[in-house]
Image (cartoon, grey):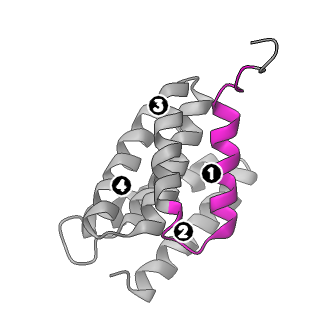
Amino acid sequence: MLSTKLYKKVHTLAEDLLRAAHRDNTTLFEELYGELRALCEEHEGTEKNHPVQWETLADFTEESDDAIVLYKKALAFAEAESAFDYIASINYAMAVLFKELGENEQALAAAEKANEQAGNIGDDVLKEEIVKLISSIQPPPPHPIYG
């Protein structure tokens, strides 16, 4: 279970990381990223471990391969807790990243996994984004007349 204190810490770090990125303050960004990574590693294997911290770390990871590894770690923790909202959002984030990398098969697979979990969550915005993503990845069906 996610404590309020941990959520607030991760949320604050995410906001600060966004501000540093928007200001192109690489030094501050790297410092904050290191702080978030340390927080994740500190909680790994404890009752304080939670997918939100790993998903957030992946969101701010610049190297795509490294981000995918972190998303998969977050996903494993989310699945272990049956945290459907996190399972959906992590799969969605991976699908977006795979699509950006031109890995459409993997993108579609992750988006469809996100969509499977979308029925278990109340986030209508995420549900809509997942559907849009799937339709942007899937080729349109052939026209009934022109094939």
Between label 2 and label 1, give the one nearer the viewer.
Answer: 1
Q: Are marks 3 and 1 in contact (CB under 8 Å)?
A: no
Mark earlier in primary sequence (2, 1): 2
Which residue does the image show at 54% across and 68% down from the upper left?
13
Mark 4: give few (<14), some (14-19) or many (20+) Cα within 10 Å: many
Q: Callout 1 environment at 10 Å: few (<14), some (14 to 19), or many (20+)?
A: many
- Mark 3 sits on what residue? 106
Give the structural element (helix, strand or loop) at label 1: helix
> Label 2 sits on what residue type?
Leu
Q: Nearer the viewer, mark 3 or mark 2?
A: 3
Q: Measure the alpha-carbon separation of dots 3 and 1.
A: 14 Å
Query: Between disc 4 and disc 1, whose residue precedes?
Result: 4
Q: Which residues are magenta?
A: 118-142
Q: Is residue 102 visible?
A: yes
Between 65 and 84, the residue placed more toward the observer is: 84
- In space, the residues marked 2 and 1 are separated at their CA atoms by 26 Å
Whether the magenta-drawn stretch holds residue 12 is answered as no
Residues under labels 4 and 2: Cα distance? 20 Å
Query: Residue beneath label 4, please?
Result: 75
Disc 2 target residue = 13
Residue carrying label 1:
130
Foreground residue, 40 or 131?
131
**In the figure, 101 relative to 41: above or below?**
above
CA separation, marks 4 and 1? 17 Å
Which amino acid, mark 4?
Leu
Circle 2 packing at 10 Å, graded few (<14), some (14-19), many (20+), is many
